[in-house]
Image (spheres, rainbow, N blue to C red):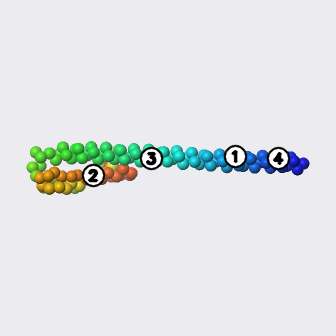
Amino acid sequence: MTRVTRRKGMILLQTLVMSVILSMIAVMVMQWVLGRYMTATRTYRSSASKVRSQGYSSNLFSMWSMMSYPSFGLIPTSGSTCMDGFSLIYSRGALSPTNGMFVKIDADQDSPDPSCP
């Protein structure tokens, strides 16, 4: 009688150990999958934000041709717009009046702006 009880106890212990090991493996696999998902999501959002910023800066540069604005003083120094439901904010500064200018564009890549169409 004790031999049968001992065997049942060993089988239950083996089952418990196997279930704990399998659950630990499942947790590690889920951590790996979610880590890959987060990396892919960040990469996508970053590239989409860069594309929006570059497209808008190209549009600004084409509007700011020297025929439309003969001097840097007439070009707006800051502003904002909406593109694909995200808000883009730009600011412009001149390195020197004859040496060109730089434009900084900030795009919020994580949360769409509800006020943008």
- Marks 3/1: CA distance? 32 Å
Find residue 38 and name its label: none
Q: Where does the image place residue 40, in percent across and percent down from the top left?
A: 44, 44
Q: Earlier in the sequence, mark 4 or mark 2?
A: 4
- Would you call the spot at circle 4 few (<14 residues within 10 Å), some (14-19), or many (20 or more)? few
Q: In this view, does 45 lie to the left or right of 16?
A: left
Q: Name the residue under label 4.
A: 7
Residue drawn at point x = 52 percent, y = 45 percent: 33
Q: Earlier in the sequence, mark 4 or mark 3?
A: 4
Q: Which of marks 3 and 1 is nearer the N terminus?
A: 1
Q: Is residue 45 left or right of residue 34?
A: left
- Would you call the spot at circle 1 few (<14 residues within 10 Å), some (14-19), or many (20 or more)? few
Callout 4 amino acid: Arg
Callout 2 amino acid: Ile
- Would you call the spot at circle 2 few (<14 residues within 10 Å), some (14-19), or many (20 or more)? some
Q: Name the residue under label 1.
A: 18
- Marks 4/2: CA distance? 71 Å
Callout 3 amino acid: Thr
- Marks 4/3: CA distance? 48 Å
Callout 1 amino acid: Met
Q: Earlier in the sequence, mark 4 or mark 1?
A: 4
Q: Name the residue under label 3.
A: 39
Q: Nearer the viewer, residue 87 or 54?
A: 54
Q: Name the residue under label 2.
A: 105
Q: Where does the image place residue 72, in percent across and percent down from the top left?
A: 13, 53
Residue 79 appears in the figure: no
